[in-house]
Amino acid sequence: MRKVSRLSRFNVASLALGLAFLYLPILILVIYSFNASRLVTVWGGWSLRWYREFFNDRAMIEAAWMSLRVAVASASIATVLGTLAAVALSRGEGFRGRTLFSGMLYAPLVMPEVITGLSLLLLFVALNAERGFWTVTIAHTTLTMCFVAVVVQSRLGSLDRSLEEAAMDLGCAPVRAFLLVTLPLIAPSIIAGWMLAFTLSLDDLVIASFTTGPGSATLPIRIYSEVRLGVKPEINAICTLVIGLIAIVIVIASLASKLSSSQGESAAPL
Amino acid sequence: MSARRIFARPARFAAIAPYLWMALFFLVPFGFVLKISLSQTAIAQPPYEPVFDLTAGWAAIKAAFGALSVDNFKLLVSDDLYVFAYARSLTVAATATAILLLIGYPIAYGMARLPTRWQAVAMVLVIVPFWTSFLIRIYAWINILQHDGLLNQILLALHLVSQPVVWLSTDSAMYLGIVYSYLPFMILPLYATLAKMEPALEEAAADLGAPPGAVFWLVTFPLSLPGVGAGVLLCFIPIVGEFVIPDLLAGSNSLMIGQTLWLEFFTNKDWPVASAAAIILLVVLLLPLLLYERVRRRQLEER
Protein backbone atom coordinates (compact mmCIF):
# COMPACT_ATOMS: atom_id res chain seq x y z
CA MET A 1 0.00 0.00 0.00
CA ARG A 2 1.29 3.44 -0.84
CA LYS A 3 1.58 5.68 2.14
CA VAL A 4 0.48 9.25 1.57
CA SER A 5 0.52 10.41 5.15
CA ARG A 6 4.31 10.10 5.33
CA LEU A 7 6.02 13.38 6.17
CA SER A 8 7.54 14.67 2.95
CA ARG A 9 10.54 16.94 2.62
CA PHE A 10 8.19 19.68 1.43
CA ASN A 11 6.17 19.38 4.65
CA VAL A 12 9.26 19.71 6.83
CA ALA A 13 10.61 22.65 4.83
CA SER A 14 7.35 24.62 4.93
CA LEU A 15 6.99 23.97 8.64
CA ALA A 16 10.56 25.03 9.41
CA LEU A 17 10.32 28.16 7.25
CA GLY A 18 6.98 29.06 8.80
CA LEU A 19 8.30 28.78 12.34
CA ALA A 20 11.46 30.73 11.46
CA PHE A 21 9.26 33.47 9.98
CA LEU A 22 7.26 33.60 13.20
CA TYR A 23 10.20 33.66 15.60
CA LEU A 24 13.15 35.45 13.97
CA PRO A 25 11.83 39.03 14.29
CA ILE A 26 11.08 38.53 17.99
CA LEU A 27 14.51 36.99 18.57
CA ILE A 28 16.22 39.90 16.84
CA LEU A 29 14.24 42.36 18.96
CA VAL A 30 15.29 40.62 22.18
CA ILE A 31 18.97 40.58 21.15
CA TYR A 32 18.94 44.25 20.23
CA SER A 33 17.39 45.19 23.58
CA PHE A 34 20.79 44.35 25.13
CA ASN A 35 22.59 46.58 22.64
CA ALA A 36 24.79 49.25 24.29
CA SER A 37 24.65 51.57 21.29
CA ARG A 38 22.25 54.49 21.10
CA LEU A 39 21.69 53.70 17.44
CA VAL A 40 19.25 50.85 17.25
CA THR A 41 20.99 49.28 14.28
CA VAL A 42 24.65 49.49 15.25
CA TRP A 43 25.84 46.77 17.59
CA GLY A 44 27.80 48.31 20.47
CA GLY A 45 28.26 45.32 22.76
CA TRP A 46 26.04 43.83 25.47
CA SER A 47 24.50 46.18 28.02
CA LEU A 48 21.53 46.59 30.34
CA ARG A 49 21.48 50.32 29.71
CA TRP A 50 18.00 50.47 28.15
CA TYR A 51 16.51 48.45 30.97
CA ARG A 52 17.85 51.04 33.43
CA GLU A 53 16.35 53.81 31.27
CA PHE A 54 12.99 52.07 31.44
CA PHE A 55 13.06 51.74 35.23
CA ASN A 56 13.83 55.46 35.47
CA ASP A 57 10.98 56.38 33.11
CA ARG A 58 8.14 57.26 35.46
CA ALA A 59 5.46 57.60 32.79
CA MET A 60 6.30 54.17 31.39
CA ILE A 61 6.34 52.54 34.83
CA GLU A 62 2.96 54.07 35.65
CA ALA A 63 1.55 52.83 32.35
CA ALA A 64 2.95 49.36 32.99
CA TRP A 65 1.39 49.33 36.48
CA MET A 66 -1.98 50.43 35.06
CA SER A 67 -1.78 47.68 32.44
CA LEU A 68 -0.97 45.02 35.03
CA ARG A 69 -3.85 46.05 37.32
CA VAL A 70 -6.33 46.13 34.41
CA ALA A 71 -5.07 42.75 33.15
CA VAL A 72 -5.43 41.05 36.56
CA ALA A 73 -8.86 42.55 37.26
CA SER A 74 -10.35 41.97 33.81
CA ALA A 75 -8.89 38.45 33.49
CA SER A 76 -10.37 37.49 36.86
CA ILE A 77 -13.88 38.79 36.08
CA ALA A 78 -13.66 37.38 32.55
CA THR A 79 -12.71 33.94 33.89
CA VAL A 80 -15.75 33.78 36.18
CA LEU A 81 -18.16 35.01 33.50
CA GLY A 82 -16.54 33.02 30.69
CA THR A 83 -16.63 29.78 32.70
CA LEU A 84 -20.30 30.32 33.56
CA ALA A 85 -21.03 30.96 29.89
CA ALA A 86 -19.17 27.81 28.86
CA VAL A 87 -21.09 25.72 31.41
CA ALA A 88 -24.40 27.15 30.21
CA LEU A 89 -23.54 26.51 26.55
CA SER A 90 -22.26 22.97 26.91
CA ARG A 91 -24.47 21.69 29.75
CA GLY A 92 -27.54 23.96 29.63
CA GLU A 93 -29.09 22.27 26.60
CA GLY A 94 -31.39 24.45 24.54
CA PHE A 95 -32.40 27.33 26.78
CA ARG A 96 -34.32 30.27 25.50
CA GLY A 97 -32.15 32.78 23.61
CA ARG A 98 -29.29 30.33 23.25
CA THR A 99 -28.59 31.38 19.66
CA LEU A 100 -28.36 35.05 20.62
CA PHE A 101 -26.19 34.12 23.59
CA SER A 102 -23.66 32.11 21.60
CA GLY A 103 -23.74 34.74 18.85
CA MET A 104 -22.86 37.45 21.37
CA LEU A 105 -20.05 35.28 22.72
CA TYR A 106 -18.47 34.55 19.36
CA ALA A 107 -18.96 37.95 17.69
CA PRO A 108 -16.25 39.83 19.66
CA LEU A 109 -13.70 37.20 18.57
CA VAL A 110 -13.84 38.42 14.98
CA MET A 111 -15.25 41.93 15.36
CA PRO A 112 -12.72 44.62 14.34
CA GLU A 113 -11.45 46.22 17.53
CA VAL A 114 -12.21 49.76 16.35
CA ILE A 115 -15.93 48.93 16.30
CA THR A 116 -15.93 47.28 19.74
CA GLY A 117 -13.90 50.14 21.19
CA LEU A 118 -16.03 52.86 19.64
CA SER A 119 -19.32 51.31 20.70
CA LEU A 120 -18.18 50.79 24.29
CA LEU A 121 -16.93 54.37 24.53
CA LEU A 122 -20.26 55.71 23.30
CA LEU A 123 -21.99 53.62 25.98
CA PHE A 124 -19.69 54.95 28.70
CA VAL A 125 -20.25 58.53 27.53
CA ALA A 126 -24.01 58.00 27.50
CA LEU A 127 -23.85 56.53 31.02
CA ASN A 128 -21.71 59.48 32.04
CA ALA A 129 -19.11 57.11 33.48
CA GLU A 130 -15.74 58.52 34.42
CA ARG A 131 -13.24 56.93 32.06
CA GLY A 132 -10.13 55.27 33.42
CA PHE A 133 -9.28 52.05 35.19
CA TRP A 134 -12.81 50.66 35.45
CA THR A 135 -13.97 51.46 31.94
CA VAL A 136 -10.88 49.79 30.43
CA THR A 137 -11.35 46.83 32.76
CA ILE A 138 -14.99 46.42 31.72
CA ALA A 139 -14.05 46.69 28.05
CA HIS A 140 -11.30 44.10 28.37
CA THR A 141 -13.58 41.78 30.36
CA THR A 142 -16.16 41.92 27.57
CA LEU A 143 -13.56 40.96 24.97
CA THR A 144 -11.61 38.34 26.91
CA MET A 145 -14.54 36.46 28.51
CA CYS A 146 -15.37 35.23 25.01
CA PHE A 147 -11.91 33.67 24.69
CA VAL A 148 -12.24 32.11 28.17
CA ALA A 149 -15.64 30.69 27.18
CA VAL A 150 -14.17 29.09 24.04
CA VAL A 151 -11.23 27.53 25.91
CA VAL A 152 -13.34 26.18 28.81
CA GLN A 153 -16.11 25.00 26.49
CA SER A 154 -13.71 22.92 24.40
CA ARG A 155 -12.53 21.23 27.61
CA LEU A 156 -16.10 20.64 28.81
CA GLY A 157 -16.94 19.15 25.44
CA SER A 158 -14.18 16.55 25.67
CA LEU A 159 -15.03 15.66 29.25
CA ASP A 160 -16.53 12.26 30.03
CA ARG A 161 -20.03 13.13 31.23
CA SER A 162 -20.55 9.78 32.92
CA LEU A 163 -18.47 11.07 35.85
CA GLU A 164 -20.91 13.87 36.71
CA GLU A 165 -23.83 11.57 35.98
CA ALA A 166 -22.44 8.95 38.31
CA ALA A 167 -22.09 11.54 41.06
CA MET A 168 -25.71 12.59 40.58
CA ASP A 169 -26.97 9.02 40.40
CA LEU A 170 -25.29 8.49 43.74
CA GLY A 171 -27.40 11.32 45.14
CA CYS A 172 -25.22 14.36 44.61
CA ALA A 173 -27.13 17.59 43.92
CA PRO A 174 -26.22 19.07 40.49
CA VAL A 175 -24.44 22.14 41.90
CA ARG A 176 -22.50 19.93 44.31
CA ALA A 177 -21.62 17.51 41.52
CA PHE A 178 -20.36 20.44 39.47
CA LEU A 179 -18.23 21.80 42.31
CA LEU A 180 -16.82 18.41 43.39
CA VAL A 181 -16.47 16.60 40.07
CA THR A 182 -16.63 18.89 37.03
CA LEU A 183 -14.81 21.94 38.38
CA PRO A 184 -11.62 20.08 39.41
CA LEU A 185 -11.57 18.38 35.99
CA ILE A 186 -11.83 21.64 34.05
CA ALA A 187 -9.63 23.63 36.45
CA PRO A 188 -6.55 23.53 34.18
CA SER A 189 -8.50 24.99 31.27
CA ILE A 190 -9.90 27.67 33.58
CA ILE A 191 -6.33 28.58 34.54
CA ALA A 192 -5.32 28.58 30.87
CA GLY A 193 -8.33 30.80 30.14
CA TRP A 194 -7.26 33.27 32.84
CA MET A 195 -3.73 33.38 31.40
CA LEU A 196 -5.05 33.97 27.89
CA ALA A 197 -7.34 36.75 29.12
CA PHE A 198 -4.43 38.28 31.04
CA THR A 199 -2.11 38.40 28.02
CA LEU A 200 -4.86 39.63 25.69
CA SER A 201 -5.61 42.49 28.06
CA LEU A 202 -1.91 43.30 28.47
CA ASP A 203 -1.65 43.40 24.68
CA ASP A 204 -4.67 45.46 23.74
CA LEU A 205 -4.13 48.89 22.26
CA VAL A 206 -7.20 49.82 20.25
CA ILE A 207 -9.98 49.10 22.75
CA ALA A 208 -7.96 50.62 25.60
CA SER A 209 -7.37 53.78 23.54
CA PHE A 210 -11.10 54.25 23.11
CA THR A 211 -12.17 53.46 26.64
CA THR A 212 -9.49 55.06 28.81
CA GLY A 213 -9.52 58.61 30.04
CA PRO A 214 -6.88 61.32 30.18
CA GLY A 215 -3.96 60.49 32.47
CA SER A 216 -4.52 56.75 32.60
CA ALA A 217 -2.71 55.33 29.61
CA THR A 218 -1.89 51.63 29.47
CA LEU A 219 1.52 50.32 28.42
CA PRO A 220 0.53 49.57 24.79
CA ILE A 221 -0.85 53.11 24.44
CA ARG A 222 2.48 54.55 25.66
CA ILE A 223 4.52 52.18 23.48
CA TYR A 224 2.37 53.03 20.49
CA SER A 225 2.83 56.78 20.88
CA GLU A 226 6.61 56.27 21.22
CA VAL A 227 6.82 53.92 18.23
CA ARG A 228 5.03 56.43 16.02
CA LEU A 229 7.85 58.89 16.70
CA GLY A 230 10.48 56.40 15.60
CA VAL A 231 12.48 53.49 16.92
CA LYS A 232 13.97 53.90 20.38
CA PRO A 233 16.23 51.37 22.09
CA GLU A 234 14.26 51.74 25.33
CA ILE A 235 11.20 50.30 23.59
CA ASN A 236 13.22 47.18 22.73
CA ALA A 237 13.90 46.71 26.44
CA ILE A 238 10.24 47.22 27.45
CA CYS A 239 9.08 44.83 24.75
CA THR A 240 11.58 42.20 25.92
CA LEU A 241 10.31 42.54 29.49
CA VAL A 242 6.73 42.06 28.29
CA ILE A 243 7.79 39.03 26.23
CA GLY A 244 9.55 37.62 29.31
CA LEU A 245 6.43 38.12 31.45
CA ILE A 246 4.25 36.43 28.84
CA ALA A 247 6.75 33.58 28.53
CA ILE A 248 6.40 32.95 32.28
CA VAL A 249 2.62 33.00 31.91
CA ILE A 250 2.80 30.49 29.04
CA VAL A 251 5.03 28.15 31.04
CA ILE A 252 2.54 28.20 33.94
CA ALA A 253 -0.38 27.66 31.56
CA SER A 254 1.30 24.74 29.82
CA LEU A 255 2.22 23.19 33.17
CA ALA A 256 -1.45 23.48 34.11
CA SER A 257 -2.57 21.76 30.92
CA LYS A 258 0.12 19.09 31.33
CA LEU A 259 -1.28 18.48 34.81
CA SER A 260 -4.70 17.96 33.26
CA SER A 261 -3.43 15.61 30.54
CA SER A 262 -1.60 13.50 33.11
CA GLN A 263 -4.99 13.10 34.79
CA GLY A 264 -6.15 11.21 31.75
CA GLU A 265 -7.85 13.24 29.08
CA SER A 266 -5.92 15.14 26.48
CA ALA A 267 -5.67 18.83 27.24
CA ALA A 268 -7.61 21.40 25.30
CA PRO A 269 -5.49 23.52 22.96
CA LEU A 270 -4.44 26.92 24.35
CA MET B 1 -30.62 10.37 30.66
CA SER B 2 -32.23 11.73 33.79
CA ALA B 3 -29.03 13.02 35.43
CA ARG B 4 -28.39 15.07 32.31
CA ARG B 5 -31.74 16.75 32.54
CA ILE B 6 -31.28 17.48 36.23
CA PHE B 7 -27.95 19.08 35.45
CA ALA B 8 -29.29 21.18 32.57
CA ARG B 9 -31.49 23.33 34.80
CA PRO B 10 -28.80 24.87 37.05
CA ALA B 11 -26.48 25.02 34.05
CA ARG B 12 -29.00 27.31 32.37
CA PHE B 13 -28.92 29.58 35.40
CA ALA B 14 -25.18 29.91 34.83
CA ALA B 15 -26.01 31.85 31.67
CA ILE B 16 -27.68 34.73 33.54
CA ALA B 17 -24.60 36.71 34.58
CA PRO B 18 -22.63 36.41 31.31
CA TYR B 19 -25.83 36.98 29.34
CA LEU B 20 -26.58 40.23 31.12
CA TRP B 21 -22.95 41.33 30.85
CA MET B 22 -22.79 40.74 27.09
CA ALA B 23 -26.19 42.35 26.54
CA LEU B 24 -25.16 45.46 28.46
CA PHE B 25 -21.60 45.80 27.19
CA PHE B 26 -21.82 44.33 23.72
CA LEU B 27 -25.36 44.54 22.35
CA VAL B 28 -26.61 47.78 23.87
CA PRO B 29 -23.51 49.77 22.74
CA PHE B 30 -24.44 49.09 19.11
CA GLY B 31 -27.74 50.83 19.81
CA PHE B 32 -25.78 53.86 20.93
CA VAL B 33 -23.58 53.74 17.83
CA LEU B 34 -26.71 53.61 15.66
CA LYS B 35 -28.33 56.45 17.57
CA ILE B 36 -25.30 58.71 17.36
CA SER B 37 -24.73 57.91 13.69
CA LEU B 38 -28.15 59.45 13.08
CA SER B 39 -27.51 62.66 14.98
CA GLN B 40 -25.94 65.91 13.91
CA THR B 41 -22.40 66.90 14.65
CA ALA B 42 -22.24 69.62 17.29
CA ILE B 43 -19.44 71.57 18.88
CA ALA B 44 -20.18 70.46 22.38
CA GLN B 45 -19.21 67.90 24.99
CA PRO B 46 -20.05 65.17 23.93
CA PRO B 47 -19.70 66.36 20.34
CA TYR B 48 -23.09 65.41 18.96
CA GLU B 49 -26.67 66.59 19.36
CA PRO B 50 -28.62 64.25 21.59
CA VAL B 51 -31.32 62.48 19.64
CA PHE B 52 -33.46 61.15 22.47
CA ASP B 53 -34.07 62.86 25.74
CA LEU B 54 -36.24 60.50 27.75
CA THR B 55 -36.92 63.11 30.43
CA ALA B 56 -38.62 65.43 27.94
CA GLY B 57 -41.75 63.32 27.53
CA TRP B 58 -43.48 61.60 24.66
CA ALA B 59 -44.02 64.62 22.40
CA ALA B 60 -40.33 65.44 22.53
CA ILE B 61 -39.41 61.87 21.68
CA LYS B 62 -41.71 61.99 18.68
CA ALA B 63 -40.10 65.23 17.60
CA ALA B 64 -36.68 63.69 18.09
CA PHE B 65 -37.57 60.84 15.76
CA GLY B 66 -38.39 63.44 13.14
CA ALA B 67 -35.00 65.04 13.70
CA LEU B 68 -33.12 61.84 12.93
CA SER B 69 -30.99 62.39 9.89
CA VAL B 70 -29.16 60.16 7.50
CA ASP B 71 -26.84 63.02 6.50
CA ASN B 72 -23.80 61.19 7.87
CA PHE B 73 -24.53 58.18 5.74
CA LYS B 74 -25.11 60.39 2.69
CA LEU B 75 -21.75 62.02 3.36
CA LEU B 76 -20.00 58.67 3.63
CA VAL B 77 -21.49 57.39 0.41
CA SER B 78 -20.88 60.54 -1.61
CA ASP B 79 -17.37 61.42 -0.41
CA ASP B 80 -14.63 59.71 -2.43
CA LEU B 81 -12.34 59.61 0.58
CA TYR B 82 -14.61 57.20 2.42
CA VAL B 83 -15.59 55.17 -0.61
CA PHE B 84 -11.89 54.67 -1.38
CA ALA B 85 -11.19 53.75 2.24
CA TYR B 86 -13.85 51.01 2.14
CA ALA B 87 -12.64 49.76 -1.24
CA ARG B 88 -9.03 49.74 -0.06
CA SER B 89 -9.90 47.92 3.17
CA LEU B 90 -11.71 45.19 1.27
CA THR B 91 -8.90 44.87 -1.30
CA VAL B 92 -6.17 44.76 1.35
CA ALA B 93 -8.11 42.22 3.41
CA ALA B 94 -8.83 40.01 0.38
CA THR B 95 -5.21 40.11 -0.82
CA ALA B 96 -3.77 39.51 2.64
CA THR B 97 -6.21 36.65 3.28
CA ALA B 98 -5.23 35.02 -0.02
CA ILE B 99 -1.52 35.28 0.88
CA LEU B 100 -2.27 33.93 4.36
CA LEU B 101 -4.08 30.93 2.88
CA LEU B 102 -1.17 30.25 0.48
CA ILE B 103 1.42 30.42 3.26
CA GLY B 104 -0.67 28.94 6.05
CA TYR B 105 -1.93 25.86 4.21
CA PRO B 106 1.48 24.18 3.68
CA ILE B 107 2.43 24.92 7.29
CA ALA B 108 -0.82 23.50 8.67
CA TYR B 109 -0.48 20.52 6.33
CA GLY B 110 3.08 19.91 7.50
CA MET B 111 1.89 20.07 11.12
CA ALA B 112 -0.93 17.59 10.52
CA ARG B 113 1.55 15.11 8.99
CA LEU B 114 3.92 15.20 11.97
CA PRO B 115 4.00 12.27 14.41
CA THR B 116 1.34 12.87 17.08
CA ARG B 117 3.91 13.72 19.76
CA TRP B 118 5.41 16.48 17.62
CA GLN B 119 2.03 17.84 16.55
CA ALA B 120 1.45 19.12 20.07
CA VAL B 121 4.87 20.77 20.12
CA ALA B 122 4.31 22.41 16.72
CA MET B 123 0.91 23.62 17.89
CA VAL B 124 2.40 25.28 20.97
CA LEU B 125 5.09 26.87 18.77
CA VAL B 126 2.43 28.36 16.50
CA ILE B 127 0.31 29.60 19.40
CA VAL B 128 3.13 31.24 21.39
CA PRO B 129 3.55 34.22 18.99
CA PHE B 130 -0.21 34.71 19.25
CA TRP B 131 0.29 35.20 23.00
CA THR B 132 3.06 37.71 22.38
CA SER B 133 1.89 41.29 22.05
CA PHE B 134 1.05 42.05 18.45
CA LEU B 135 2.19 45.64 18.87
CA ILE B 136 5.60 44.27 19.84
CA ARG B 137 5.63 41.98 16.83
CA ILE B 138 4.88 44.90 14.49
CA TYR B 139 7.53 46.90 16.27
CA ALA B 140 10.03 44.07 15.75
CA TRP B 141 9.44 44.40 12.01
CA ILE B 142 9.98 48.17 12.14
CA ASN B 143 13.39 47.39 13.66
CA ILE B 144 14.21 45.13 10.75
CA LEU B 145 12.66 47.15 7.91
CA GLN B 146 13.83 50.65 8.74
CA HIS B 147 16.27 52.57 6.56
CA ASP B 148 19.43 51.32 8.32
CA GLY B 149 17.73 48.21 9.67
CA LEU B 150 18.93 44.64 9.59
CA LEU B 151 17.36 43.77 6.23
CA ASN B 152 19.07 46.61 4.38
CA GLN B 153 22.35 45.88 6.19
CA ILE B 154 22.24 42.26 5.03
CA LEU B 155 21.28 43.18 1.48
CA LEU B 156 24.10 45.76 1.32
CA ALA B 157 26.64 43.32 2.78
CA LEU B 158 25.69 40.72 0.19
CA HIS B 159 25.94 43.40 -2.55
CA LEU B 160 22.41 42.58 -3.62
CA VAL B 161 21.55 46.28 -3.58
CA SER B 162 23.83 49.28 -3.92
CA GLN B 163 21.90 51.58 -1.60
CA PRO B 164 19.33 51.06 1.16
CA VAL B 165 15.87 50.15 -0.09
CA VAL B 166 12.85 51.94 1.33
CA TRP B 167 10.77 49.23 3.05
CA LEU B 168 8.88 51.13 5.72
CA SER B 169 5.74 53.05 4.79
CA THR B 170 5.06 50.86 1.79
CA ASP B 171 2.20 48.51 1.03
CA SER B 172 4.62 45.56 0.99
CA ALA B 173 5.62 46.32 4.58
CA MET B 174 1.94 46.52 5.54
CA TYR B 175 1.15 43.16 3.90
CA LEU B 176 4.17 41.64 5.60
CA GLY B 177 2.98 42.94 8.97
CA ILE B 178 -0.58 41.73 8.44
CA VAL B 179 0.49 38.27 7.24
CA TYR B 180 2.90 37.99 10.15
CA SER B 181 0.30 38.96 12.75
CA TYR B 182 -2.58 36.87 11.42
CA LEU B 183 -0.69 33.71 10.43
CA PRO B 184 -1.63 31.76 13.61
CA PHE B 185 -5.32 32.62 13.00
CA MET B 186 -5.07 30.96 9.59
CA ILE B 187 -2.92 27.98 10.61
CA LEU B 188 -4.94 26.85 13.64
CA PRO B 189 -8.36 26.22 12.02
CA LEU B 190 -6.68 24.67 8.96
CA TYR B 191 -4.63 22.40 11.18
CA ALA B 192 -7.72 21.44 13.19
CA THR B 193 -9.54 20.10 10.10
CA LEU B 194 -6.43 18.57 8.47
CA ALA B 195 -5.45 16.71 11.65
CA LYS B 196 -8.95 15.25 12.01
CA MET B 197 -9.00 14.03 8.41
CA GLU B 198 -8.89 10.28 7.92
CA PRO B 199 -5.53 9.42 6.24
CA ALA B 200 -7.16 6.27 4.82
CA LEU B 201 -9.09 8.48 2.37
CA GLU B 202 -5.91 9.88 0.86
CA GLU B 203 -4.32 6.43 0.85
CA ALA B 204 -7.33 4.95 -0.91
CA ALA B 205 -7.15 7.61 -3.63
CA ALA B 206 -3.43 6.94 -4.07
CA ASP B 207 -4.00 3.18 -4.14
CA LEU B 208 -6.56 3.64 -6.88
CA GLY B 209 -3.89 5.35 -8.94
CA ALA B 210 -4.37 9.06 -8.35
CA PRO B 211 -1.14 11.05 -8.67
CA PRO B 212 -0.23 13.14 -5.56
CA GLY B 213 -1.55 16.37 -7.14
CA ALA B 214 -4.91 14.77 -7.84
CA VAL B 215 -5.05 13.30 -4.33
CA PHE B 216 -4.59 16.79 -2.93
CA TRP B 217 -7.05 18.64 -5.17
CA LEU B 218 -9.73 15.94 -5.32
CA VAL B 219 -9.58 14.61 -1.76
CA THR B 220 -7.54 16.62 0.75
CA PHE B 221 -8.49 20.15 -0.25
CA PRO B 222 -12.27 19.65 -0.59
CA LEU B 223 -12.32 17.90 2.79
CA SER B 224 -10.42 20.79 4.40
CA LEU B 225 -12.88 23.42 3.13
CA PRO B 226 -14.56 23.97 6.54
CA GLY B 227 -11.13 24.85 7.96
CA VAL B 228 -10.40 27.08 4.98
CA GLY B 229 -13.69 28.89 5.53
CA ALA B 230 -13.05 29.39 9.24
CA GLY B 231 -9.48 30.57 8.66
CA VAL B 232 -10.50 32.98 5.91
CA LEU B 233 -13.25 34.51 8.07
CA LEU B 234 -11.05 34.68 11.15
CA CYS B 235 -8.49 36.69 9.14
CA PHE B 236 -10.60 38.63 6.64
CA ILE B 237 -13.04 40.30 9.03
CA PRO B 238 -10.56 41.79 11.52
CA ILE B 239 -8.15 42.80 8.74
CA VAL B 240 -10.87 44.91 7.08
CA GLY B 241 -11.08 46.98 10.26
CA GLU B 242 -7.34 46.86 10.96
CA PHE B 243 -5.95 50.09 12.30
CA VAL B 244 -2.55 49.65 13.92
CA ILE B 245 -0.65 47.72 11.24
CA PRO B 246 -1.45 50.03 8.30
CA ASP B 247 -0.90 53.02 10.57
CA LEU B 248 2.61 51.92 11.55
CA LEU B 249 3.79 50.16 8.39
CA ALA B 250 1.90 51.58 5.39
CA GLY B 251 2.32 55.00 3.84
CA SER B 252 -0.13 57.72 4.75
CA ASN B 253 -1.43 58.40 1.23
CA SER B 254 -4.31 55.95 1.20
CA LEU B 255 -6.08 55.03 4.40
CA MET B 256 -8.08 51.98 5.36
CA ILE B 257 -11.50 52.38 6.94
CA GLY B 258 -10.23 51.55 10.42
CA GLN B 259 -7.77 54.43 10.20
CA THR B 260 -10.40 56.77 8.77
CA LEU B 261 -12.77 55.89 11.59
CA TRP B 262 -9.98 56.47 14.13
CA LEU B 263 -9.05 59.87 12.59
CA GLU B 264 -12.69 60.95 12.37
CA PHE B 265 -13.08 60.06 16.01
CA PHE B 266 -9.87 61.21 17.69
CA THR B 267 -8.56 63.94 15.38
CA ASN B 268 -11.65 65.48 13.77
CA LYS B 269 -13.81 64.62 16.80
CA ASP B 270 -16.72 63.96 14.45
CA TRP B 271 -18.43 61.24 16.45
CA PRO B 272 -21.60 60.98 14.34
CA VAL B 273 -19.60 60.40 11.15
CA ALA B 274 -17.31 57.91 12.92
CA SER B 275 -20.40 56.06 14.18
CA ALA B 276 -21.94 55.99 10.73
CA ALA B 277 -18.65 54.64 9.33
CA ALA B 278 -18.70 51.91 11.98
CA ILE B 279 -22.30 50.96 11.11
CA ILE B 280 -21.46 50.65 7.41
CA LEU B 281 -18.36 48.60 8.24
CA LEU B 282 -20.49 46.34 10.40
CA VAL B 283 -23.01 45.79 7.61
CA VAL B 284 -20.23 45.13 5.09
CA LEU B 285 -18.73 42.52 7.43
CA LEU B 286 -22.04 40.83 8.25
CA LEU B 287 -22.47 39.83 4.61
CA PRO B 288 -19.54 37.36 4.41
CA LEU B 289 -20.47 36.02 7.87
CA LEU B 290 -24.07 35.29 6.85
CA LEU B 291 -22.88 33.79 3.57
CA TYR B 292 -20.48 31.50 5.41
CA GLU B 293 -23.16 30.47 7.89
CA ARG B 294 -25.51 29.62 5.02
CA VAL B 295 -22.93 27.55 3.15
CA ARG B 296 -22.03 25.73 6.35
CA ARG B 297 -25.65 24.94 7.14
CA ARG B 298 -26.18 23.59 3.62
CA GLN B 299 -23.11 21.38 3.99
CA LEU B 300 -24.46 20.05 7.28
CA GLU B 301 -27.82 19.29 5.70
CA GLU B 302 -26.20 17.41 2.83
CA ARG B 303 -24.47 15.04 5.21
Image: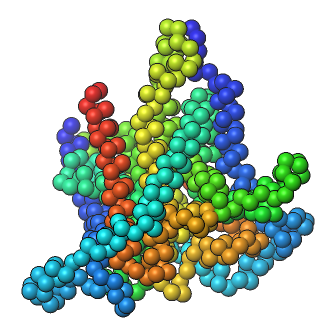
Nearer to me, A118 or B279: B279
In the rendered image, residue A248, in percent from the top left (x then y), is placed at 64, 59
Q: Position of residue B175 (x, y in %)?
A: 60, 53
Report the number of discs.
0
In the shown orientation, is residue B273 left or right of residue A250? left
Q: Is B145 on the left-hand or right-hand side of A134?
A: right
Q: Is residue A56 left or right of residue B178?
A: right
Scheme by which the image is coloured: rainbow
Quadrant where the image shows the N terminus of chain B: top left
Residue at the left extreme of this rendering: B59
Up/down of B212 relative to A139, above or below: above
At a point 49% along the width and 57% down the height, the residue shown is B88
Q: As drawn, is A28 to the left or to the right of A92?
A: right
The picture places residue A252, in percent across and down from the top left corner, at 60, 56
Q: Quadrant of residue B162?
A: bottom right
Q: Front-most of B207 and A231?
A: A231
Residue B298 lies, with reference to residue B256, above or below; the image says above
Q: Residue at x 55, y 80 (%)?
A: A217
Image quarter where the C terminus of chain B lies is: top left
Name the residue at 52% across, 12% down.
Answer: B210
* Residue A69 percent coordinates (x, y): 53, 75
Image: B108 above or below B236: above
- Please name whichever residue, B286 or B264, is drawn nearer the observer in this view of the structure: B264
